[in-house]
Image: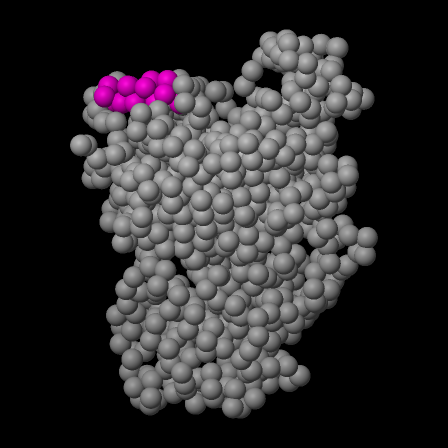
């Protein structure tokens, strides 16, 4: 019998959107360090591979004003991860940091510092920022065309790797299209040499970037069929880059609701969805697509009878993926067919949880997805802060361990790259793609 | 002398003396826990952490991140990392420091500096940095402090309302975008970090020129100055008060610390010859940069006592050799300062502001408007 594939889990620190229920009785502060202490201790008890923290560069706006319905405000990524390094021992510390609104020399120095201070547990989710709204908070301002964003990000990561490889031993001289860096790095080579690179983009450019640089993909595709298709596509390309299947871990985001029985779980899921989609949030959600003020509409009534405004920028600070006219038509058809009000439709669209059931059912579902190669694991997203993952750790983790596919202890002194079962880095390499592989 | 003297320690990747050996493991959290935890236990009021983008004074990590990593392991000591302003994004600087204040539960400060901006320019490829004059760099530093103070007040303390009836988490009227447009950078929005325990972090500057002193008098809370003798120390103090009047400083006067490099041995002779050996090894005397006291703990305590008598708020001690002289400061010097009534170690957790005897900072946007430069 072959050994089972090992499940990899990451713990998503609750973020600033309506997934995080601030009205729950046990909802704590989004910023007090005590919330982070609790969250990190619980995640480490649950033997997660890493903690994951998103980045905020500007407070979100809706209809030209600050969006006030969701949780807002969070710590700066690097400082909080460093503080968490001080109170944890084994868990990885992964944060989102923009390659658009940072300079490679400074960010490389900070990430190498975090890798030292954490004993080799640092990871970097590389994102590119897309709009002038965020740019207005930064020296370099503005933004880049979509194609240039990834080109700049790739050069950014390459420069960072040159610096990390050199450490204090020798000067680096990099002169490229986007960056000129000439000098010696002040931080010695760190325990992992490079922090683990995580990537979340889904586009062709994003996938190509991942093939060169990423060791983890944080994907949106958690449902089995979609996850399997994404896994097959991305992992299928790896051989072309000279990489093997295990050198890149795919971890989709997954929300969950644990119940005492399947029925109990369904009821709790419904309650959570109602808390996540308040009447006001339902209207704001639809306004994002309609691009206009809909505050006169009844959230418990039908969808607006007016058409969306094309090219509207009603919501800022959030990525929009789809054509509003097409989306609006699809939503209307579904609401008509199923007899849904605005709020019910929004719950159906956004309030669906990835993993709903008893602890045993959830463990089965996770285990199957990993053993059947639909994923390498999940980034688990809780609904409240800081207690959102307590139940997962107390109830689901022991079930996963019983199935023989989840660790029962961390390896002593392991660096994050080892915790993730990634291959060792090739000394001196600035890309993960084999030399000569098509990029 | 109405107050006890405050004692700060200046920590870097090695001792203050360039002829001394660098830290054995500058990247290890254990090293910093030992240094800063030991300083707290001994009663040192605050530490400043040096930083640079250059490989200068030995290999070193990012000072803000060292302070953040140490914060949860300490409860009383003030944590004041150097964060430079010439090559950084001011928004990241302000929010990173604010986060340090959250994780230290109100013990963060900012040692603001332009760094070696022109020497660091090739590391960033920021082409115009090479052309910036000292005056430009200082103007940019002032803008960075003004902006940070705006961002630190951009959330009122009660901006989070969690009002279930209206579905609102925030009261958007209690959040105030920076809308800062300066010569060097612009920042439009509010901070992403809710107001921190201290609100306004104490801002400290090393002052060596009249221009720096003016900038400090306008924007800082703490200055670190350097004088070779008592006469010099007295004249700097007068100059500081004159400058405060000239720029019409509002609020609390600057808290003034004098910088002192310290080398401690059991006898005066041993201290002198140890300093000579280091000077020789470095190829230049340390006293060219900073006042150096190489002596017994008794003699150093007396030197510090006379600065206290002049009216200084504090002294920042730079261990000539690290960790040796820090250990001797803690073991030998601090008990003498306490016995002579110059220093009183803090025995309870407190904010850095209150450690510096600065009043609580009211948010400038709150209804009860407070004083703020």
Q: Locate residue B268: give its quadrant.
A: bottom left
Q: How is the image coloured?
A: one colour
Q: In this view of the protein, which residue sits in the foreground, A334 or A258?
A: A258
Whole-percent x and y of residue B155? 69, 47
Q: Is residue A349 magenta?
A: no
Q: Residue at 79% x, 56% y: name it.
A: B369
Whole-percent x and y of residue B226? 51, 71
Overall secondary structure of the magenta stretch?
helix
Number of marks = 0
**Any part of residue B44 in sight:** yes
Image quadrant containing the N terminus of chain A: top left
Image quadrant containing the C terminus of chain A: top left
Q: In this view of the protein, which residue sits in the foreground, B120 or A242?
A: A242
Q: Is residue A198 left or right of residue B309?
A: left
Q: Locate residue A24: give its quadrant.
A: top right
Where A309 sits versus B12, above or below?
A: above
**Any part of residue B148 in sight:** no
Which span of residues is magenta-colored?
Answer: A227-241
């Amino acid at each position: 019998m072959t050994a089972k594939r090992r499940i990899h889990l990451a713990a998503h620190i609750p973020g600033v959107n309506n997934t995080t229920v601030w009205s729950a009785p046990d909802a704590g502060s989004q910023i007090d360090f005590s919330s982070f202490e609790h969250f990190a201790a619980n995640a480490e008890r649950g033997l997660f591979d890493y903690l994951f923290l998103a980045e905020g560069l500007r407070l979100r706006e809706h209809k030209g004003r600050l969006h006030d319905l969701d949780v807002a405000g969070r710590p700066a990524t690097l400082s909080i991860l460093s503080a968490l390094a001080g109170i944890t021992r084994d868990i990885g510390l992964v944060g989102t940091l923009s390659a658009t609104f940072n300079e490679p020399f400074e960010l490389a120095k900070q990430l190498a510092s975090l890798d030292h201070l954490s004993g080799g547990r640092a990871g970097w989710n590389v994102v590119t920022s897309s709009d002038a709204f965020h740019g207005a908070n930064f020296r370099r301002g503005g933004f880049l065309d979509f194609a240039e964003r990834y080109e700049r990000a790739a050069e950014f990561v390459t420069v960072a790797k040159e610096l990390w490889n050199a450490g204090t031993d020798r000067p680096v001289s990099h002169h490229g299209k986007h960056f000129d860096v000439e000098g010696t790095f002040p931080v010695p080579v760190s325990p992992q040499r490079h922090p683990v690179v995580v990537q979340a983009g889904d586009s062709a450019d994003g996938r190509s970037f991942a093939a060169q640089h990423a060791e983890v993909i944080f994907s949106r595709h958690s449902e089995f069929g979609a996850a399997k298709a994404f896994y097959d596509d991305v992992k299928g390309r790896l051989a072309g880059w000279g990489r093997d299947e295990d050198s890149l871990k795919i971890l989709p985001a997954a929300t969950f609701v644990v119940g005492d029985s399947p029925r109990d779980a369904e009821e709790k899921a419904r309650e959570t969805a109602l808390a996540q989609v308040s009447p006001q949030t339902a209207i704001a959600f639809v306004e994002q697509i309609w691009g206009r003020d809909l505050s006169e509409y009844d959230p418990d009534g039908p969808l607006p009878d007016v058409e969306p405004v094309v090219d509207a920028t009603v919501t800022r600070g959030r990525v929009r993926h789809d054509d509003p006219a097409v989306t609006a038509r699809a939503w209307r058809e579904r609401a008509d067919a199923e007899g849904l009000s605005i709020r019910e439709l929004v719950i159906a669209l956004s309030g669906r949880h990835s993993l709903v059931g008893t602890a045993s059912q959830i463990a089965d579902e996770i285990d199957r997805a990993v053993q059947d190669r639909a994923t390498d694991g999940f980034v688990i997203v809780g609904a409240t802060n800081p207690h959102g993952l307590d139940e997962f750790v107390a109830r689901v983790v022991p079930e996963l361990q019983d199935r023989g596919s989840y660790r029962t202890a961390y390896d002593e002194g392991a660096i994050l790259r080892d915790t993730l079962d990634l291959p060792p880095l090739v000394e001196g390499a600035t890309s993960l793609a084999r030399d000569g592989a098509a990029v | 002398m109405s107050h006890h003297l405050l004692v700060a320690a200046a920590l870097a990747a090695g001792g203050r003396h360039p002829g001394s050996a660098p830290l054995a493991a500058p990247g290890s959290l254990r090293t910093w826990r030992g240094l800063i935890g030991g300083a707290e236990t001994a009663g040192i009021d605050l530490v400043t952490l040096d930083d640079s983008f250059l490989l200068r004074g030995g290999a070193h990590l990012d000072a803000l991140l060292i302070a953040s990593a140490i914060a949860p392991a300490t409860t009383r000591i003030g944590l004041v990392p150097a964060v430079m302003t010439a090559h950084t994004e001011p928004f990241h600087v302000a929010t990173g420091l604010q986060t340090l204040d959250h994780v230290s539960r109100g013990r963060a400060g900012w040692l603001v500096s332009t760094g070696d901006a022109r020497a660091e320019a090739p590391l960033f490829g920021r082409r115009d940095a090479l052309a910036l004059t000292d005056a430009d760099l200082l103007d940019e530093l002032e803008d960075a402090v003004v902006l940070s103070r705006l961002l630190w007040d951009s959330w009122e303390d009660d901006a989070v309302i969690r009002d279930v009836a209206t579905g609102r988490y925030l009261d958007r009227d209690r959040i105030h975008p920076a809308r800062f447009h300066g010569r060097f950078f612009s920042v439009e929005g509010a901070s992403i970090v809710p107001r921190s325990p201290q609100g306004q972090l104490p801002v400290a500057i090393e002052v060596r020129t009249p221009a720096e002193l003016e900038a400090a008098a306008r924007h800082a809370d703490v200055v670190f100055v350097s004088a070779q003798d008592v006469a010099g120390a007295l004249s700097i103090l007068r100059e500081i008060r004159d400058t405060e009047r000239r720029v019409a400083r509002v609020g609390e006067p600057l808290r003034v610390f004098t910088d002192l490099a310290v080398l401690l041995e059991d006898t005066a002779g041993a201290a002198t010859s140890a300093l000579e050996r280091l000077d020789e090894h470095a190829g230049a005397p340390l006293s060219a940069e900073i006042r150096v006291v190489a002596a017994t703990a008794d003699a150093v305590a007396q030197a510090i006592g006379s600065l206290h008598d002049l009216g200084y708020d504090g002294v920042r001690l730079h261990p000539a050799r690290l960790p040796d002289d820090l250990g001797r400061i803690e073991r030998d010097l601090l008990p003498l300062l306490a016995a002579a009534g110059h220093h009183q170690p803090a025995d309870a957790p407190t904010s850095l502001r209150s450690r510096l005897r600065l009043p609580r900072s009211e948010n400038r946007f709150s209804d009860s408007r407070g004083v703020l430069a």
